[in-house]
Amino acid sequence: MDFISILSIFVMACFVGYYVVWSVTPALHTPLMAVTNAISSVIVVGALVASAAEGSAVSKWLGLGAVVLASVNIFGGFAVTERMLAMYKKKEKK
Amino acid sequence: MEHVASVPSWAMLAYLISGVLFILALRGLSSPATSRAGNRYGMIGMTIAMVTTLVTHGIASLPEIAGAIAIGGGVGFVTARKIKMTDMPQLVAAFHSLVGLAAVLVGLAAYLNPGAFGILGADGLIEPQSRVEMGLGIAIGAITFSGSIIAFLKLAGKMSGSPILLPGRHVLNLGTLIAILGLVAYFTQDQSQWVIATITVLSFLIGFLLIIPIGGADMPVVVSMLNSYSGWAAAAMGFTLHNTAMIITGALVGSSGAILSYIMCKAMNRGFLSVIAGGFGAEAAAGGGAAKEQRPWKRGSAEDAAYMMKEAENVIIIPGYGMAVSQAQHALREMGDVLKKEGVNVKYAIHPVAGRMPGHMNVLLAEANVPYDEVFELEDIQSEFSQADVAFIIGANDVVNPAAKTDKSSPIYGMPVFDVDKAKTIFFVKRSMGGVGYAGVDNDVFYMDQTMMLLADAKKMVEDIVKALAH
């Protein structure tokens, strides 16, 4: 992929993000932060590439370190979001 | 770019799908009813991205990688289970710092082993364009890391929440930022180690310097801003790796944090730059003390509050950070339940900047089993104060201060506030008369005819009211 196609995806995604986030209800802003935290750990993809590659031992260990950090975030972020969302309940109908 | 083309097209498709699933994850949050399904989409998207990467990059180091995921995942999962809901702001700050540090490590790994990332040019050097992306990714990641550490320490109370003002800090900060940008530009000409090392160190430093002058109650803006940065760091790495999942996610998270910062600033009627410049509240607290006059105010008791609220038709409860500090949300819900049984119409009113992060009060009330359809945002409930018999303010202060509407010289002038003065009776739960809100300004509501001050710890006071209601 050339730079322009990547840039196009990026710019479009910014617009999608803009509209999607404005539609998030303010009551769920804390879960929003927790889940964006979890998904921004998709940076783990880069960490996995570094960990799997041959050629530089230092690079590999840096990658493994990043895998640990990103995994804390992925598992922690999704789990804490799940926990919070489970608490939001509607009024019980009697 | 032959290396990049070697990523099979099914893998590119998989990354695209995981990007779309992340969009759906955020989309689900438009309503509590769809939010849990959204979170599941996010998990599926992450699984697809990770499995795709592992499959396409050989599985030579699989045991080590599995170990790393198990260690990190275990720590994350246990933390997420155990954390108290009132500690959520500092948890989110801590998580941000990890994303930031991970971005720095990935950037450095890519610098040391560019071949593996497919960013080697024909001349055996890293492509200049990739150097810019890498440099920016490392810089933003490092700022996110050190900034979030400071935010975490302030939110967790391990460091004073009051602004720390260094002399000449604006010049220092601006100079450091320019130096970082200059070095990133120079990096395209010279890929020596000292350049990348200096960028990293300076960025760690600027993250620290940027956050120390910002006070505790401005943390909602800071946490949102760092959220945004963690997204831009991921996006920059996505450019380096030509990975659509990372770019889409980075853009989503980046805009999400930016929008939240904007909402928070607007709710305080302050410019983003003024918040970031820091020092808010420090001047007002220093200068305002002398002019303070003694004005008469009335003290109420738990029995007064119980009696008035039992007789009321409409009660609006306004929680603030003080409720979180004293963990009063469960007692408050109990009070609401008793009142509802008495036929009172109970509603909760939440200001966008109440608490220490966006939506903080909503989560605490949800934790205490308050149904979310009894909880209202500022603009939805503002008109109801004129029909309210009782406004019950607990742990909030600046968000009900009428000076924001009338006093042009007030530091909070122009901030949207609740019209509590329109309610027939006001109960103001506060620890003592001495303290003022974060903005360091006196509040006219204390001295109004219809106001009764309930001076006690918030949780203790609400428990006493619940007891009094039982009689």
Image (tube, grey):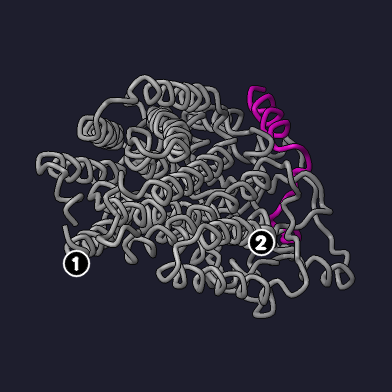
Residue wearing tag 1:
A4
In-front residue for pair B205/A73: B205
In-front residue for pair B363/A55: A55
Give the residues drawn in magenta, as a range. Answer: B446-471
The disc labelled 2 sits on which kind of residue?
Leu
Residue B64 place in picture, x, y as percent: 40, 23
Q: Which mark is residue A90?
A: none
Residue lying farthest to the left in this orientation: B9
Q: Chain of mark 2?
A: B
Secondary structure category for the residue under label 2: helix
In-front residue for pair B347/B226: B226
Q: Are marks 1 and 2 on the same chain?
A: no
Are circles 1 and 2 on residues that touch, CB within 8 Å?
no
Position above or below: B32 against B221 = above
- Image quadrant occupied by the C terminus of chain B: top right
Question: Residue at image x 36%, y 43%?
Answer: A43
Is residue B314 shown to the viewer in this render? no
Residue B456 place in picture, x, y as percent: 78, 39
Residue wearing tag 2:
B209
Residue B374 place in picture, x, y as percent: 42, 40
Question: Residue at image x 43%, y 45%?
Answer: B109
Q: Does the magenta-highlighted stretch encompass residue B457?
A: yes
- The residues bearing labels 1 and 2 have C-alpha atoms spaced at a distance of 35 Å
